[in-house]
Image: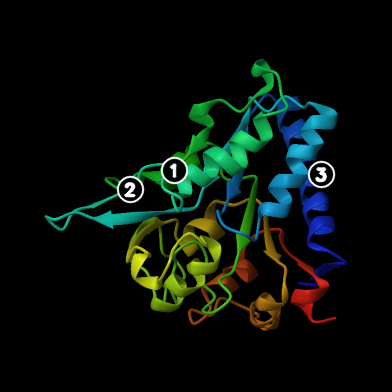
Amino acid sequence: MTPRIYDTADALGYHLAERIASGLRDAQSEGRAFVLGCPGGRSPTPVYAAFAQLMRDARLDCSTLIIAMMDEYLLSGVDGSLSAPSPSAHYSCKGFGERDIRGRINESLPKQLQIPPQNLWMPDPTQPSTYDGRLAAAGGVDLFLLASGAGDGHIAFNPPGTQRDSTTRIVKLADQTRRDNLATFPDFRSVDEVPTHGLTIGTGSIANLSKSVAMILWGRDKQTAFQRITGASSYDPDWPATIVQECRNAEVHADRAAAGV
């Protein structure tokens, strides 16, 4: 897999935004929805920003675009139960999807062209395993945008040691993942505020349900991730983001800072 290197993260974002637009048009010509797998956090933000700009200029019909989120934090109740935070919480992945993906894309589109609320998909913490079935019933994920944790290679919330064929489930977050997420969600004042559990799509789910994937790496802090992912020939459970090596039509997109060139 030869990585594609860009001068800037913005150039990377624009390339993938155009690809999403093209895929959306193709799916509509076939009379079907286009399913876009989306992580939250910093890595995909240049893509979401560029796609929103394209919508300001091109005004595509996004009513058949499905945003399939990857994960969500879970909060522990006094009885030990786990539940998703309010979407208004600064770290809510659903809230991120509503504000930074769906909301940003919709803001320049007339209502009839907007992504409807029901097209933002999240796994259900009460029935995690149903998410894989829902994605399969939709025909799979047309394009899954992926990101790697800088410190431990987590993908979604899959921690180091994740089995290759893991499916959507509840996991205990790795300590390094929680530390990485202090940068992802800077309103956390310390690692003690980061939830200890999360709901995540599995590495096997990503590999088995995606028609194509694009790993996004930008910034100097992703140099180790770039080296681990591009240096792998198959899935390495010590760095779960290497699952990209076993996905169909897989690509790595990086800026010069992440690639170290």
For the point 39% across and 74% down, which residue is it? 174
Residue 56 image position (x, y, % from top left):
80, 31
Image quadrant in which the C terminus is located: bottom right
| Label 3 environment density (alpha carbons within 10 Å; few <14, some 14–19, many ≥20) | some
How much space separates mark 3 and mark 1, taking CA atoms? 25 Å
How much space separates mark 3 and mark 2, taking CA atoms? 33 Å
For the point 65% across and 61% down, which residue is it? 43
Q: Is residue 72 left or right of residue 116?
A: left
In the rendered image, which residue does mark 2 sit on? 84
Q: Residue at the top extreme?
A: 112
Which three-letter amino acid code belongs to the residue tagged 3? Glu
Q: Which mark is residue 122?
A: 1
Q: Is residue 81 left or right of residue 261?
A: left
Instruction: Say whether disc 3 or disc 1 marks the residue closer to the N-terminus.
Output: 3
Image quadrant in which the N terminus is located: bottom right
Secondary element at image label 2: loop
How much space separates mark 1 and mark 2, taking CA atoms? 11 Å
Q: Please state which of residues 79 and 251 is positioned toward the viewer in this rendering.
A: 79
Residue 133 image position (x, y, % from top left):
42, 43
Q: Residue at the right extreme?
A: 7
Secondary element at image label 3: helix
Q: Which mark is residue 95?
A: none
Which three-letter amino acid code belongs to the residue tagged 2? Ala
Instruction: Say whether disc 1 or disc 2 marks the residue closer to the N-terminus.
Output: 2
In the rendered image, which residue does mark 3 sit on? 18
Q: Please state which of residues 85 and 234 is positioned toward the viewer in this rendering.
A: 85
Which three-letter amino acid code belongs to the residue tagged 1? Met
Q: In the rendered view, would you say 27 is above or below 161? A: above
| Label 1 environment density (alpha carbons within 10 Å; few <14, some 14–19, many ≥20) | many
Tags 1 and 2 touching, CB below 8 Å: yes
Q: Is residue 20 left or right of residue 188?
A: right
